[in-house]
Each structure stands twice: as C-alpha cells, then as structure tokens.
Image (cartoon, grey):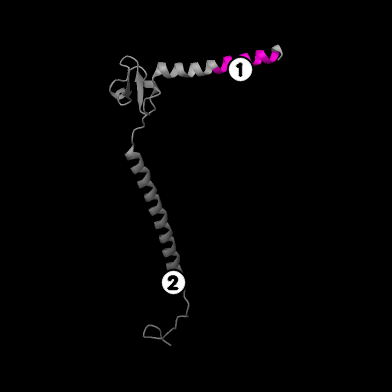
Amino acid sequence: MDSGALRCIYWITLLVATLINGINADNILSGSSHCEKYEFWNTDVGVCVPCSECKQYPKTPSCDTCPPIEPLDSWRVAAITSLSVLSAVIVFGALVIGVLVHQCRLKRTLREPIEETTGPLYPV
C-alpha cells in the first residue's frame, strides 16, 4: 500500500475513535443517558431530577435542558370554540332571515286582479 492510503486510513480511524469517545464522554458527564424525558441530570446530587422542580426553584442549574412545559390554557380553547359557534349561529340566522324576507316579499305581489264592486260609497 502506498503512503497516501495508509494516511487516509489513519485519519479515518482517528476520526471515528474521537467521535465514539466524545459521545461516551458526553453521556458520562451529563448523565442524561438514563434520565426520562421530563427529567434532568443534577451533577450536585448525582441523580435525575424531575423538571417540575424548575417551577419551584427556577435558578436550579441545568433547568434549561428541560423541554418547555406549556400551560394548559383551557380558557383560550373555550373562547375560540364559543366564538366559532356564535359566528356560525349569526351566519345561519342571517341566512334564515334573508330567506324569510324574500319569501314574504314574494307573497305581497298581486297574482289575481282585484274585483271592483259598487257600494253605497261609490254611486254608479
């Protein structure tokens, strides 16, 4: 083998070894390999701590590694739902009123001629 191929194999081996050792070092240092999704590794205690502790103690180190916990805004869901239902009722009501007014105007037209009669007020 020529020296170029040996040099290439050497660098690839060195790169793979560095990547493997770097990944293992990250797992050992952070301890996050065995923590659950809503837990973080506390280096002071040496255990996984639930992310709910960050609400009580926001200055705890490593709280920024927790995924953001979104509050349940049930009032927003209720407001959006009620406004959607209200708008649907208004649109449906406007359509019904429009149809009724249209039907009422159609009934007003005279379809048969009015028969004139003579009476005491109209002398012949």
Q: Nearer the viewer, mark 2 or mark 1?
A: 1
Residue pointed to by mark 1: 12
Taking the spot 29% from the left edge, 20% from the top edge, the residue there is 57
Residue 121: image location, x then y, percent: 37, 83
SS type, badge 1: helix
The magenta span reads: 4-16
The 10 Å Cα crowd at callout 1, few under 14, some 14 to 19, many 20 or more, is: few
The 10 Å Cα crowd at callout 2, few under 14, some 14 to 19, many 20 or more, is: few
Q: Residue furthest front?
A: 1
Q: Is residue 14 above or below residue 80?
A: above
Residue pointed to by mark 2: 107
Residue 83: image location, x then y, percent: 37, 46
- The kind of residue tagged 2 is Lys
**Relative side of 16 to 7, left or right:** left
Does the magenta run of residues contain 8? yes
Quadrant in the picture for residue 95: bottom left
**Relative side of 86 to 22, left or right:** left
Taking the spot 38% from the left edge, 43% from the top edge, the residue there is 80
Quadrant in the picture for residue 27: top left
Q: Earlier in the sequence, mark 2 or mark 1?
A: 1
Could you tell me which quadrant the C terminus lies in? bottom left
Taking the spot 35% from the left edge, 39% from the top edge, the residue there is 76
SS type, badge 2: helix
Q: Is residue 1 above or below residue 51?
A: above
Estimate the spatial distance between the alpha carbons at disc 2 and disc 1, rounded to whole Å. 91 Å
Taking the spot 56% from the left edge, 18% from the top edge, the residue there is 16
> Which is more toward the observer, 79 or 122?
79
